Amino acid sequence: MAGIPADLLFEGARLATMGGAGLGVVENGVLAVRAERIVYAGPRDGAPRFDAAERVDCNGRWITPGLVDCHTHLVFAGDRSEEFARRLAGESYAEIARSGGGIASTVRATRAADEAALLAAALPRLDALLAEGVTTVEVKSGYGLDEETERRQLRVARALAGQRAVTVRATYLGAHAVPADNTRAGYLDLVCDRMIPALAAEGLADAVDVFQEGIAFTGAECARVFTAARAAGLPVKSHAEQLSDTGGAALAARFGALSADHLEYCSNAGAAAMAQAGTVAVILPGAFLMLNEARKPPIAAFRAEGVPMAVATDLNPGSSPIASLRVSATLACVLFGMTVEEVWRGMTLHAARALGLQAEAGSLEAGKRADLALWSVDSLAQVVAQIGPSPLWARYHGGVRA
Ligand code: NIG
Ligand code: FE
């Protein structure tokens, strides 16, 4: 009897499917791919017989879902290393922002850069993520703060998917800061009344994000942005409770946000609201580290409430210049006490959910895209227990070796 046709068959693998409550480990597993999708991922014993065009002997290596970096700002121009030195000398992130540095500094550089320059600057950052097994990346705008530059950033984000084998989700973060050349009210009108409907109609944004913070936007202002986003059919996300508790997590949950991110100052009530709404907590230890923050996100409350936790890089030129999701996971373990299992689910299953991509990515399940990371390690702890050379052996995007 003929077997089931497949394009690609991985044999002799150890699988971490992320199915069930844990890592979904399958020793001696096989994984079959057809037409860019997983058609089987499970134990060799009891697997159907496949007629595969190509077979890969994994020799006991691990296969995990391709990693998902669900929070980055990797399209930008300029450099803010000088601010690193200023923070070492005692200035805070908020003080630097108020003095015209911070986000405003990157806005000036990004406005002055054309599309080709932004793309050229972004590619090496993206390549660093891909070299460690990332197959899906989210990219935010928010360094233009005017119509033209925000669009340019989003176009470059989309263009990245044409340059590399990666799935890109583009998020409009117009409400990142008030630009120096506009009023608060005038800028919010632009974001809510013009940009959000236009970007939704043009298909340039997959989601809308805000920065709810003392140095950025209030809860009322963010609620207005969320209302505009929902009216335009776009899901929302929030930079919430990074530097202080302004109720951002609960507000995001009220609007059914895909995720609330940072969350160092999130209250128990915020965590409970997120659990109710199914909003993912995106943990960003890179920003915590680089800002030398003292307050840790309430991991225990997220666990107790059953809030799914993702881990991401927050790759940006200021608060988190870290182009490694693997190191971000290591930091989440060491600094916040997350477990190896939690950070693995946080870089795959829950990160996909934070982008609304849970039907497509984040686990090894029949029907999902064949986005895979293959690792030359004995245990999955090895991937996050060291800051050093990447143990990635191969990366597949949509069933194609990348
Ligand atoms: O996620 N929190 C606000 N925005 C970014 C940082 C932006 C910047 O410093 O350039 C963040 O940390
Ligand atoms: Fe961010």
Image: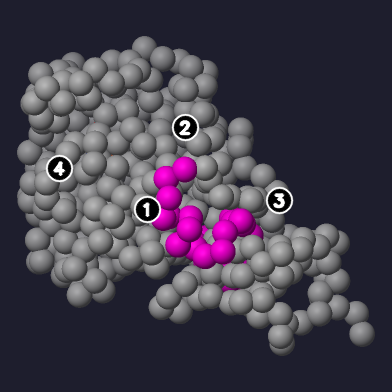
Please tell me which residue is depicted at 47% across the width and 72% down the height of the picture.
23
- Residue 202 in view of the camera: no
**Disc 1 and disc 2: Cα gap in Å?**
17 Å
The extreme bottom residue here reads: 46
Ranked by sequence position, the earlier of labels 3 and 1 is 1
**Disc 4 and disc 2: Cα gap in Å?**
24 Å
Tag of residue 293: 4
Q: Which residue is mark 2?
A: 125
**Labels 4 & 2 near each other (Cβ < 8 A):** no
Q: Is residue 263 magenta?
A: no
Camera-near label (3 vs 4) is 4
Q: Residues within 10 Å of mark 4 (few under 14, many from 20)?
A: few
**58, above or below 68, in the image:** below
**Disc 3 and disc 4: Cα gap in Å?**
41 Å
Element under label 3? strand
**Disc 2 and disc 3: Cα gap in Å?**
22 Å
The extreme top residue here reads: 112
Q: Residues within 10 Å of mark 1 (few under 14, many from 20)?
A: many
- Residue 298 in view of the camera: yes
**233, above or below 143, in the image:** below
Percent x, y of residue 249: 17, 57
Closest to the observer: 211 or 203?
A: 211
The residue stretch that appears in magenta? 361-388
Confirm or reject: label 4 Cβ below 8 Å from ligand 1. Answer: no
Camera-near label (1 vs 2) is 1
Ranked by sequence position, the earlier of labels 1 and 2 is 2
